Amino acid sequence: MSIMLMVIIKVRLRWWVMLLDDDDDDDDDDDGANLTHIGVTHVLNAAEGADDNYHVTADKEIYRPAGIKYKGVEASDDTEFDLSKHFNNCADYIADALEGGGKVMVFCKVGSSRSAAIVLAFLMLKRHYTAPEAVKRVRSRREICPNDGFLQQLCDLNETLKSIGHFDKKRPQSTNM
């Protein structure tokens, strides 16, 4: 089982995908079929919304023929946006995919704030990483920069989980995220 943090940047109607996994493969993708070649079974768009400079309006239907499951989260990369309301649902989606032997592509517009915050929350909620441990783990693979509001929400999550002894539980054995 593995999780991938992906960066998708729309450049002149073409999607460039940078895959960060244990093997650090790079690939580009114009449709869902190409994602299956790198083992992606689930997609989580952390920037669903209007087609503008801040969101990624993905054509959900391109994933269906390839058998890839799609989840979109309407989220803005704004310090005032409450991304934490999506933490549990997204963590469950990622965990369910991984437990089923799948690979998850998590992306947003730039790949360093919204998607990173979602992956950090997953590591905290499902893999029992503290916020600093999760950040260190992800940054060991790629640079991320969640906005200050998302960082505060992750700190709040960290304090809540700490207060209930969540981090005292044994971390699931996995060499991957």
Image: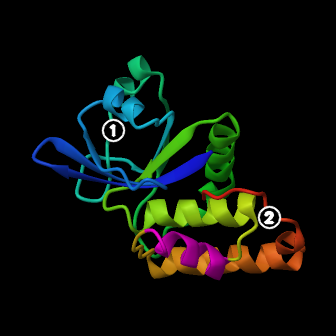
Q: Measuring 64% from the left and 78% from the top, which residue is drawn there?
A: 133
Q: Measuring 71% from the left and 76% from the top, which residue is drawn there?
A: 130
Label 1 neighbourhood size at 10 Å, few (<14), some (14-19), many (20+)?
Answer: some
Label 2 neighbourhood size at 10 Å, few (<14), some (14-19), many (20+)?
Answer: few
User: Spatial distance from mark 1 to mark 2, Cα to Cα?
Assistant: 34 Å
- Residue 85 x/y as whole percent: 63, 59
Up the image or down, 171 lies above or below 72; here it is below
State the extent of the magenta-drawn residues as a range.
131-141
Image quadrant for the C terminus? bottom right
Q: Main secondary structure of the magenta part?
A: helix
Q: Are marks 1 and 2 in contact (CB under 8 Å)?
A: no
From the image, state whether disc 1 or disc 2 is nearer to you. Answer: 2
Near-viewer residue (165 or 137): 137
Q: Secondary structure at mark 2?
A: loop
Near-viewer residue (176 or 76): 176
Q: Which mark is residue 171?
A: 2
Is residue 69 left or right of 128 when viewed as pictured? left
- Residue 16 x/y as whole percent: 23, 48
Label 1 sits on residue: 58
Q: Secondary structure at mark 1?
A: loop
Image quadrant for the N terminus? top right
- Residue 162 x/y as whole percent: 82, 78
Up the image or down, 58 lies above or below 166; here it is above
Near-viewer residue (174 or 152): 174
Identify residue type, mark 2: Arg
